[in-house]
Image (spheres, rainbow, N blue to C red):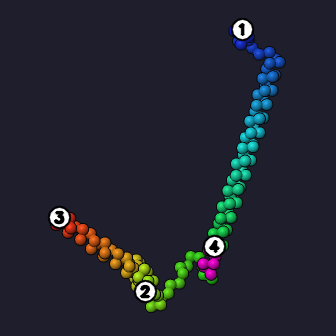
Amino acid sequence: MADENNAPLSAEERAELEALRAEKMRREAEEQARRDRAELEELRAEQAAAEKRALANEKRAVPEAAGRRRDEPAPRKARKDMSFGERMVTAPDLKEGEDIPGMPPAQKIVIAIAAVAVIAFAIYIILQ
């Protein structure tokens, strides 16, 4: 038995081995080609879906713009034409030479109430 495993291959066995190796390589190449085709189809589907989403987003953005360029900000109402609520939650317009808009009045009120609450809590803790 040991001699059979150590003996060199005969011409027939070598030819059979080469044929089996070639068949295995052919099957592996076919499997790789199938995986590549499947990946290509998947990537095409993803790209088509992304293009469809981009087109839908673009169509949704167009009615908002209505005649103005996308990079231009929406025109603001004059402060005197705003309602009380709009004036409370919008920052005042920038003055000449300013880069940062001021805080809206509603934000200032919330900060003041929070500061009063912190001071009252500190006094309560100290007096206990």
Q: In the image, 126: left or right of 12?
A: left
Q: Residue at x 16, y 66 (%)?
A: 127
Three-letter code, disc 2? Phe
Q: Residue at x 44, y 83 (%)?
A: 85
Magenta stretch: give its range: 61-66
Give the number of the disc on residue 128: 3
Q: In the image, 16: left or right of 56?
A: right
Three-letter code, disc 1? Met
Which numbered disc, 1 or 2, marks the residue closer to the eye? 2
Q: Farthest residue toward the right?
A: 12
Pointer 1 residue:
1
Q: Farthest residue toward the left?
A: 127
Q: Is residue 102 visible?
A: no
Pointer 4 residue:
60
Q: In 3D space, how far apart are the residues under numbered discs 3 and 1 (Cα atoms)?
A: 97 Å
How dense is the environment of label 1, judged by Cα within 10 Å: few (below 14), some, or many (20 and up)? few
Which numbered disc, 2 or 4, marks the residue closer to the eye? 2
Q: Residue at x 66, y 69 (%)?
A: 56
Residue 17 in magenta stretch: no
Q: Is residue 8 visible?
A: yes
- The location of residue 60, given as percent across then percent down, is 63, 73
Pointer 2 residue:
84
